Image (cartoon, helix red, strand yellow):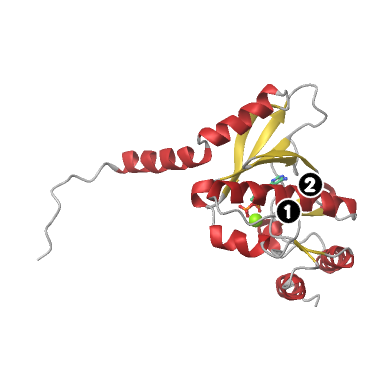
Amino acid sequence: MAKVSKRKRPPRSLKVFKEQLKTEQYVFDRFTLLALSKFFSQCVIKSLDFPIQSGKESIVFRATPHEDYPAKFLAVKVYMVETSDFVHMKEYIAGDPRFEVKKNRRKLVHEWVKKEYRNLLLCEKMGVLVPHPHMFKDNVLIMDYIGDAHAPAPTLKEHGPFNPAKDYAFLLGEVEKMRKNGFVHADLSEYNVLCGPEGRLWMIDLAQGVLQSHPKFEAWHARDVQNITRYFRRYGVC
Ligand SMILES: Nc1ncnc2c1ncn2[C@@H]1O[C@H](COP(=O)(O)OP(=O)(O)O)[C@@H](O)[C@H]1O
Ligand SMILES: [Mg+2]
């Protein structure tokens, strides 16, 4: 018969507290604090206001920049090295000549952040609506905040389309623009589109994106189109 443990279970609140502490240790480890401190000392960020969203691999905060910085708010995305999916990242880094597959876990995450930054810049240059990336260091990326003073922009999944036919055509147009410029988002879905002020749709979460030379370029392009089409089918526009 299995031995019953005599150790007392911690009270629920203590358990929750310990979980939170664990997450905080992952998010604000020594390296992240160092990276963040650079942004504070360089007079970029004045405060981290609140977490917008936390997932398994990253947490996105709204931040208030320094008075002299030319933005009202910023979005700060912190990747958690401890919980990042190493194997997944490798698949999207290998085959992209711009980046190196690093053996060291932390360095691979840094490469991933650099990739998201470079992809955002690239898309911005081709005229795709993405948050402007400001800078990155190690596992921290700073970009434009999409939202207003009251709340961050909801995802397409949370908000629903503003105008299904128009939004579907717009997103397909953005995907096509990327393809013509030799790029694929590779993780496009209703979860990675933000419904911003004035009915504008912003593509986010671009770390997976690869160039045309990647062997899976065509397959991932088709998957992006499929995901968007599947989502809009329920609105009867495709
Ligand atoms: N630039 C931004 N402005 C406002 N909110 C953002 C921004 N970037 C991300 N978010 C919020 O953070 C969430 C997670 O960001 P995302 O880049 O999709 O990371 P993940 O890899 O966790 O999916 C988004 O669903 C959105 O709610
Ligand atoms: Mg996402």
Query: Label 1: few (<14), some or many (≥20) within 10 Å?
Result: many
Q: Residue at x 78, y 31 (%)?
A: 72
In this rendering, the count of numbered labels is: 2
- Mark toward the start of the polypeptide (1 vs 2): 2
Q: Is mark 1 within 8 Å of ligand 1?
A: yes
Is 203 on the left-hand or right-hand side of 2?
right
Q: Is residue 199 above or below residue 30?
A: below
Residue 81 lies left or right of residue 44; in this view the side is left
Name which residue lies at 23% across and 46% down: 9
**Residue beneath the point at 86% across and 50% down:** 124
Residue at disc 1, secondary structure? loop
The amino acid type found where label 1 is placed reads Ile
Quarter location, residue 231: bottom right
| Mark 2 residue crowding within 10 angstroms, few (<14) / some (14–19) / many (20+) | many
Q: Position of residue 234 (x, y in %)?
A: 71, 74
Per the rendering, the mark at residue 225 is none
Residue at label 2?
131
Q: CA distance from mark 1 to mark 2?
A: 7 Å
Residue at 11% of width from left, 58% of height from top? 3
Left or right: 48 as drawn, with respect to 238: left
Ligand 1 within 8 Å, label 2 CB: yes
Residue position for label 1: 204
